[in-house]
Amino acid sequence: MRVGLITLGCDKNTVDNEYLAGILEDRGCKVCAEPEAFKGLEAVVVTTCGFIGDAKKQSIDCIVGLADNKNAEGWPKRIFVAGCLAQRHSADLLREIPEIDGIVGVGQFEQLADMILKGAPESKIAVENTPKVDIYRYMRRRRLDKAPYAFLKIADGCNHRCSFCSIPRMKGRYHSVAPDILLLEAQALLRQGVREINLVAQDISVYGQDRQDGYGLVRLLNELCALKGDFWIRCLYCYPGGVTTELLKTMAEQPKIVPYLDIPLQHFDLPVLRAMRRPARSTAVPRLLAKIRAAVPGITLRTTLIVGFPGETLQAHRCMLENIEALRFERLGAFMYSQEEDTAASTAPRQVGEATKVRRWNAVMETQTTIAAEWCAGRVGRVERVLIEGYDEERGQYTARGASEAPEIDGSVFVESVSPLKTGTFVDVEIIDSEIHDVVGRVLKK
């Protein structure tokens, strides 16, 4: 059987679909992840996102598009839906889109494979009432692309109770993946040519705190660094309360860990942070960032902010802008607040109007654009090690990323070279030009 896989949403969904692909292949299926090649496939799986309104719409539009073509010649004849939106709204999805052949929730890889291979069950819905995201055994991942980087999902679920977020309802409590499983998975990825391993979870800083053996993030990092080979490790999604002195010391001492840290703050105004119910909301951010930059020289810091949260006053918005200018994150993303059902913030008073959200979001991004452009310009003349990812025909340059560029969310390093460069190799380049979020480098002569 030939099965197509569509991955929507976060990088944790990417990992989940690679688990599913490995299971399907082990059961004799051929798996395809390129939508342009979906015609003629027997089945297609859409792994959905349910985090914010735009992500939900993207998931629904994708399913509807497949359903509209279900009986057309050459299109997949069976449609399966999985992931966060399916976990939370399975009955609604099936009622509105009856062309769906089967729905499972999060972490139900074996159940989904059974549903695809064994035909229609008595019920099209096989969603566990309690989300199950714990990985209890090593599962072979079948890479769905040829990128030289991969995500290592070290945990899933979340114990935080932020008032705007529905992830705990869709994913359940935080579950750390056992270290022996993670080390086997990392070794397998390296054997497949991966040269950058990105650690992901809702919050990687609390990895291991649900275990009884005291094994935590720092030990995991040290054991990953001990694996053979020339590769990078990148730390993503580390809440501010978990940035410890021990973690920073490890980052500074381990050459395989790139000097980069993603710290989602969401806001700077204390009343807004209280309303958001953010963990470690009393953390003195300027002091924390100064500590990080002193401990790991040259580190690139990224954060994410929410604009237009209920009760966000003009003063709170100005507080955000002032902190962006003062703290000068090298990388920064922002989202407009999305009113999600069954969250405390969805029924909070003083909801911010859409036009105000757009105006404030534009102000945030304009402020960050200036900072980003100045920072990129300051990189000109430096020598940086970069990972080659491909070739841009339109620009006539290779595409790459350095320590300062996380995959899929940050800019690029465009590389000039007189000799061919192979995807998945590291090269040293001199930065010779800059754009707003990207830089241009030239390969150093040996």
Image: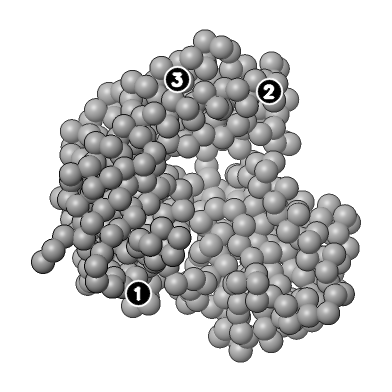
Q: Position of residue 330 (x, y in %)?
A: 34, 36
Q: Is residue 382 above or below residue 343?
A: below
Residue 193: which disc?
A: 1
The answer to whether residue 102 shows anywhere in this view is no
User: Which residue corresponds to mark 3?
Assistant: 321
Q: CA distance from mark 3 to mark 1?
A: 42 Å
Residue 170 is situated, as x and y percent measured from the top left of the image, at 65, 49
Crowding at mark 3 (Cα within 10 Å: few <14, some 14-19, many 20+): some
Left or right of 228 in this view: 360:
right
Instruction: Decide which of tag 3 and tag 2 comes sooner along the chain.
Output: 3
Are dots 3 and 1 in contact, CB under 8 Å?
no
Outermost residue toward the bottom in this view: 28
For the residue marked with disc 2, what is the amino acid?
Answer: Ala
Residue type highlighted by circle 3? Leu
Whether residue 77 is visible: yes
- At 24% from the left and 28% from the top, the residue drawn is 290
Q: How many marks?
A: 3
